[in-house]
Structure formats: structure tokens, C-alpha cells
Amino acid sequence: MSIEIKMPALSPTMEEGTLAKWLVKEGDSVKAGDLMAEIETDKATMEFEAVDEGVVGKLVVPEGTDGVKVGTVIMLLDGEGEESAPAKKDAAAETAAPAPKKEQVDAPVDRETGEKVSVENPENKRPAAEAQAPVQASAQPQAAAAPRRDGERVKASPLARRIAAEKGVDLATLAGSGPNGRIVKADVEGAQPAAAAAPSQAASWPTAAPAAAPAPAQIPDIPHQTTKLSNMRKTIARRLTESKQQVPHIYLTVDVRLDKLLKLRAELNESLGARGVKLSVNDLMIKALAAALVQVPKCNVMYTPNELVTFKRADISVAVSTPEGLITPVITEADTASLSSISTRMKDLAARARDKKLKPEEFTGGTASLSNMGMYGIKQFEAVINPPQGMILAVGAGEKRPYVIDDALGIATVMSATGSFDHRAIDGSDGAELMQAFKALCENPLGMLA
């Protein structure tokens, strides 16, 4: 019997993926641990391994297919000497009752001609009107389907749904001619978008006015090119929209003097040069944020509908730009890790993030996030919280500014940092305390090394 191999969920946020490449072909023998496919998730391209052994009977989903839902059968794996079962027939055809067979009985003899007369079994004979009744009854819903109430599921084939979306036809207003009133391609092709709302207006029960679908973007008549949205870009769009709609953000900004931190960095890099380690300002920002979160645990939290989760260590998600969008690899235990360890891990994670080679556990979790745009010369910005985390720190560029030093006006290297906080979980005063702790650690950086 064939084993159905289904699209796996390769990350906690994965709902669908792209079957980028098959690494096997039909007829190949595979065993547990063999690589079978490359699958593009919302964050990375990952290799899919076999967990059973057998012979590849059929590759159900062609390589390069987008939007394959988790749980969809993508391959049939046969045992040795077996063949894949043929595709299942339409469910309606399988359940349809077979027509009753006509049975012959002993034929009577016509008295006038002496010939036998063939007749059907009386049990199989019904009046014509009775025989036609079921057909008329089954056809009646297709000819004039009752309007559907709000929220009632519309039965339609995937092809019919796609055509309806392209034509702007409301499926709820159509009568299906398929099995059990299912809407099929022919029903949609003959429908007119302008008349789609008419049947629902004649309903005998009150219905709410349907929400207007957003109009498709009108592309100006200007030379242009279009790029298909990647799974990563779709996920970024969905999650950031949810964050801004559902998470009440509060923003707090501090100016941080960096002179001591830059001096310490130079001294550490001089001593670490023999080990091939070169600290970046971003590495020190990760350490400072992690240490501040441990000092102010009220900000190292996650909000849930029924409880507030407070973490006992600081794992920092760091925004990394890739050709397809942002991804946030995680520096675990950043509060206790050495600066050299943070630097080495960050370089490795960033390189593999750009190559889409991160493992799910390397970009999920995290108790807070850091986004640094200082290298682009951005002075200040406000980052969007990465749910379910409670905060994210946005770091700008360090620049020479007039600054009061020892009660006298001077020039200092100053950086603006803005914390975005989930106001459901973190009060303004708690967020201010965290920003104060972060500023103090950056301006007296030996404190983060103790």
C-alpha cells in the first residue's frame, strides 16, 4: 500500500510553501534520512528528508509549485514490488447508487399470435411520473439555489473560485450545477459581476451588506516590471500588518553618548585580532540590550490573552536584511554570552540568513528584538514589534553632535535609540526604566562585561 508523503510544516509560522526542487525521481529507492526535496518556507529554503523507506511511486506536486498547503500530499511512496494506486475517483461518482438491473421473468404467450411477450419485472416498473420525480427533485436546487445566509459555506471547486475571483463574481449568489449544488467552472463563466448581488436582495431573511472588496491596485501606464511575491515577503506583510493592527505600540527615545563604548571596542578588537574576532558596534548593542532586559525584567516579557510571561534570560532577535526581506536570527543567552561569542555567532547567522540556510530554531523564539540602521546613516526610526515579543529596540547612527559634557558644551559621538513597547504588557514607566538602563550600559560599557 502506498504511503502518502505530505507537505511538512518546517517552521512554526509555515502555512504553505514552495516545492522548489525534487531531489528524487519516480522509480528511485529511498531510505530514512535520504534527501527528497528542497522546500522554500516563509523564512528559508530547507531540505526535506525521508522518514520511511520504499520506492518513489509518483511525484504528485511538480517542482516549482507555489502555495502548497501544509498537509497536502506531494508524493506517493511504494513498498518494494508495489505500484501506486490510481488517483481516486470523484467522491460523487463513488457514492452514486448503481441503477437497478432489469430482470426478465417468464414471458407470457400472446393468445392471438402464439408468440412470447417480453416484459420487465413488475418490481422494477414504476409509473413514469414516479420515475422522473427524483430527477426533477435533484435538479431543482441547481436551477434555483436558495440564497445563502452570511457565514454559510459556499461549495465550489478550486477552479471555480479562481475564475470567480478574477471576474469579481460573488460565489454566494450563484446556483451550482455540480453534485450537491457544488459550483463548477461552467456556473461562474456564465455569471455577470454586475448582477451578482441581485439574488441576495430577494432573500426572505435580512442579510448584512457584504464588505466591499479592496479594489485592485491601478498600475500607472509607465514602463515598469513586476516581481512575484516570495513566501518570505508575504509572511512579512501579514505579520507586520497584524502587529500594527493588534499591538498598541508606545515609543520611547533616548540619546546615548558612545565615546567610551567606541574606545572600549577599539581596545577589545586590538586584543582579539590574533583570534580573528572583530567586534562591531552592533555586537555591543546586542549585549547592552540583553543586560538591560535582565536588569529590568518587567520588559523581558510576552503578552498572552490570559497571562503575562516573564523570561529569566535574554535571547535577542536581530534584524538581518536579505534580498527577499528581513529575517531575525536569534542570539540565545546574550545576557551571559561573551562579546566574542556574540560576534562570531552573529556573523555566521547573518551569512546563512542571506543564503536562506537557517534552521527553524535559529530564527524563532527570542525575548526581544534589535534593529540597527545606523550603517545607512539613519538618525532615528521606530521599529514594528515582532509578535509575540513585548519590545524591539531601533538603533540609529552614531554622529558628532553638540553635547553637554561636565556642565560645558562640547562635541560628542551621540546615537539615538528608540524602544517600541507592547503597551498591553509594558507600562510607559517600565519602558522608560529599560531605556535608562540601556543608556547607562552604553555610556559606561564596562558594566555590561561584569
Image (tube, helix red, strand yellow):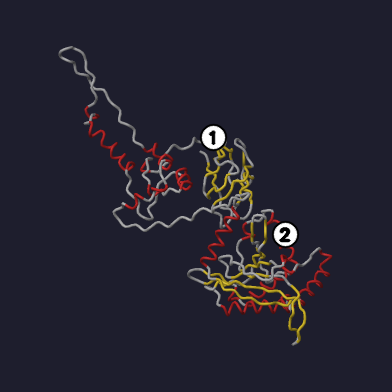
**Callout 2–callout 1 Cβ contact below 8 Å:** no
Name the residue furthest left. 111
**Residue at screen point 74% across, 81% down:** 403
Tag 1: amino acid:
Glu
> Is label 2 in a helix, a strand or a loop?
helix
| Residue closer to the observer: 38 or 51 | 38
* Residue 432 drawn above or below residue 353: below
Q: Position of residue 40 (x, y in %)?
A: 61, 50
Badge 2 crowding class, 10 Å Cα cut-off, few under 14, some 14 to 19, many 20 or more, is few
> Is label 1 in a helix, a strand or a loop?
loop
Q: Which residue is mark 1?
A: 82
| Residue closer to the observer: 419 or 292 | 419
* Residue 147 drawn above or below residue 389: above
80 vs 139, left or right, is: right
Q: Position of residue 154 (x, y in %)?
A: 40, 49
Q: Which disc number belongs to residue 142?
A: none
Name the residue furthest front. 221
What is the count of numbered marks? Answer: 2
| Residue closer to the observer: 82 or 367 | 367
Name the residue furthest top. 113
Badge 1 crowding class, 10 Å Cα cut-off, few under 14, some 14 to 19, many 20 or more, is few
| Residue closer to the observer: 361 or 180 | 180
Q: Position of residue 312 (x, y in %)?
A: 61, 72
Tag 2: amino acid:
Asp
Which of the marked residues, 2 or 1, is nearer the chain's N terminus?
1
* Residue 199 drawn above or below residue 113: below
Q: Position of residue 367 (x, y in %)?
A: 61, 68
Residue 243: image quadrant is bottom right
Q: Nearer the viewer, mark 2 or mark 1?
A: 2
Q: Which disc number belongs to residue 348?
A: 2
Distance CA(mark 2)–CA(mark 1): 45 Å
Q: Quadrant of the C terminus?
A: bottom right
